[in-house]
Image (tube, rainbow, N blue to C red):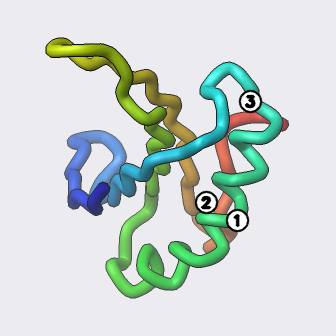
Amino acid sequence: MGVTAMNFPQGGPALMLKYMTDVKIDDRVALRKEADEIWADFRPEAEKANVSSVILSANSIPSGGIIQRGQAYNFVFQKDPSGVWKCLDTK
């Protein structure tokens, strides 16, 4: 869906990657597995952008008639001072 640069006053620069998923938003185990796979591909972009945080936003396919509704779940990856990336969401 897209990548957006963000800047948090207390956390510095970050990137948000919004993507569509077929996985049910309530299935956190499968959603996290998918996010980990996406993170493996997106991490080089985060390194190149020199950010300390990345938000991977899993978005369900909208449904409904005229008014469409969807759900989303965010995974936050943060780089610690030693340069190691960690997901703040527990498995």
The Cα–Cα distance between marks 1 and 2, rounded to whole angstroms, is 20 Å
Residue, far front: 65
Q: Earlier in the sequence, mark 1 or mark 2?
A: 1
* Contact between labelled residues 2 and 1, with CB atoms less than 8 Å apart: no
Q: Amino acid at mark 3?
A: Arg
Residue 78 spot, x, y in % from top left: 55, 54
**SS state under label 3:** helix
Q: Quadrant of residue 89?
A: top right
Q: Amino acid at mark 2?
A: Asp
Q: Nearer the viewer, residue 15 or 83?
A: 15
According to the picture, the residue beneath numbered tag 3 turns out to be 28
- Left or right: residue 1 versus residue 88 is left
Q: Nearer the viewer, residue 66 or 3?
A: 66
Q: Mark 2: give few (<14), some (14-19) or many (20+) Cα within 10 Å.
A: few
The Cα–Cα distance between marks 3 and 2, rounded to whole angstroms, is 24 Å
Q: Nearer the viewer, residue 81 or 61?
A: 61
According to the picture, the residue beneath numbered tag 2 turns out to be 80
Residue drawn at (70%, 65%), measured in percent from left and top? Answer: 37
Residue 85 spot, x, y in % from top left: 65, 64
Query: Nearer the observer, disc 3 or disc 2?
Result: 3
Residue 60 spot, x, y in % from top left: 47, 33
